[in-house]
Amino acid sequence: MRDGGVSVGEALVGLLEAYGVTDVFGIPGVHNVEMYRALPRSGITHVLTRHEQGAGFMADGYARASGKPGVCFTITGPGLTNIMTPMGQAYSDSVPMLVISSTLDVKNWGQGRGRLHEMRSQLNAAATVSQIAATCYSARDVQDRVAEAFSLFASARPRPVYLEIPLDVLKQPAGRGWKPRALASKPRATPDEIASAVARLSAAARPVIILGGGARRAGTAAAKIAEKTGAVIFTTIAAKGAIADDHPLLAGSLLPNPLATKVIMAADAILAVGTELSETDLWYQTFDITTGLIRVDIDPASLARPYPADLPITGDAEAVLSDIADSLPDQNKADARAGQVRELRIACADGHDDLRQTITTVLDTVRAAVPADTIIASDMTQIAYAANEVLRFSQPDCYLHPAGFGTLGYALPAAVGARVACPDRPVIAMAGDYGVQYTINELGTAAELGKPLVVLLWNNDALGQIRDDMVHKGIQPNAVTLINPDFAALAKAYNCDAIRPQTLDELSSALKTGLAAEGPVLIEVRPAIVKG
């Protein structure tokens, strides 16, 4: 407590709690300790990370798994620059993240006086990876900006919000007004827009539905639309699990496959929902969609680029799809195209090269060994690139992958965040031997949680995908091999167990052991396991 009542830093914690925040990721430092003054007497759990990058990725995984905003506390200067990579990942993948940082006293901004952690402009740096970036010059500013952040998360495309509070403001008396405000609602489609969408889909002979991350919780309505119209359903990586993988009209996450492209190009109506139809969704720089495109998105800007829609609808995916599904004639056309979907999936699988077939065998073992509700956070690695297509899920929010920004080091801290968000669900981090070393220090954070968490490490002693890309492009492979640490010994140094299965049966057993352990377990897998 400070003279005259609580400080702004203390009141901030109470305000976050009032907005429903239960967990915060971060690292206390000399410039943000005022934010920590009230934490011990609050209902908020603080997760101490080993690096601000880990804090940001944990907040990302937390948000994707729970649907709640992930919240981080960081400090001036390097605290911000360290967390900007996770902020960029969350921005590209539309993940709600609130980053609250200290900044120097206003009188010292940009003065070049050599103050600790001094930057020319924290705000301008953070703005490059934020939907909102704001400086709070007073207690009222903090209240307004926090309200703005949670209103954005509740009603618009969710992306990172960055708030910085000068050191002198953090210490000021808080005053009054620290109460949560009513939040805005998500937009809905007009009756005319719903009627137009229904007419176009009803008249189509070869409709297609593409579900993106913004529609990952709209799967029930999307399935009804598909069944009533005979539409083939594709999902982006972010929407895996929106439709149960055994649904007869679900083609799956096959958008980059040329065989899938043919189906989409032959469509006479395409309902694309909650997706930018971007390069990282399609892996085509140009995708020839010229007619019949119905786009539904909560972000009006996404409706105009890169593929203009014949019918653009601004609205929440679940609400719009539910309205369309309820308005379509009560009929079942699923059988009409189920055979085409089945043949497409078989043809895509038959086209796998030897490496993809090897990894698919490993992933099939993983899928069979773990419960259906297991959360898997993946990294940018060959096993994840295969999983993006072939790993099957029966419910949403189970597969967390850094699709848009494509950063290494995501899997382990994101899995820790999911572990915090969903303490009763199994969680796996799936990473490669190179990428895991970006954030391997967060094994310490995982160990401190004292809960089971499996790190499935795909070890080929190389930057395997880059090596293969070099070969494909006629470049002599270079700078793609490395001397790895003893991962098992490294895990044990963090008080974690380690297993090196030699056969697929041993992998299955190791996964079950790991998910039942009292703390993290690293399972190191090499490609030769398929021959073991």
Image (spheres, rainbow, N blue to C red):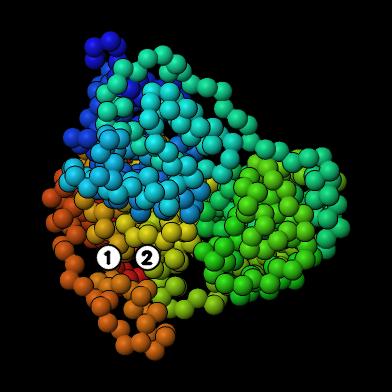
Residue 162 is at least partly visible in this image: yes
Q: Find the distance from the CA under tag 1 to the CA under tag 2.
A: 9 Å
Q: Residue at x 30, y 72 (%)?
A: 463
Q: Residue at x 64, y 60 (%)?
A: 305
Of residues 354 and 192, the one drawn nearer to the viewer in this rendering: 192
Say what amino acid the circle numbered 2 marks.
Thr
Residue 51 placement (x, y as % from top left): 24, 47
Q: Are marks 1 and 2 in contact (CB under 8 Å)?
A: yes
Neighbour class for label 1 at 10 Å: few (<14), some, many (≥20)? Answer: many
Residue 220 is at least partly visible in this image: no
Q: Quadrant of residue 99?
A: top left
Residue 345 placement (x, y as % from top left): 61, 68
Of the residues under marks 1 and 2, which one precedes in the sequence? 2
Residue 461 placement (x, y as % from top left): 25, 71
Looking at the image, residue 138 lies above or below residue 463 = above
Looking at the image, residue 227 lies above or below residue 481 = above
Residue 215 placement (x, y as % from top left): 61, 48
* Image quarter in which the N terminus is found: top left
Of residues 235 and 89, the one drawn nearer to the viewer in this rendering: 89
Say what amino acid the circle numbered 1 marks.
Tyr
Say left or right for 270 vs 23: right
Looking at the image, residue 480 lies above or below residue 97 = below
Q: Quadrant of residue 363?
A: bottom left
Neighbour class for label 2 at 10 Å: few (<14), some, many (≥20)? Answer: many
Q: Residue at x 41, y 75 (%)?
A: 355
Q: Which mark is residue 381?
A: 2
Q: Residue at x 27, y 23 (%)?
A: 171
Of residues 2 and 150, the one drawn nearer to the viewer in this rendering: 2
Say left or right for 307 vs 130: right
User: Which secondary structure, mark 2?
Assistant: loop
Work out which residue is located at the far top of the displayed protein and give it.
4
Residue picked out by circle 1: 434
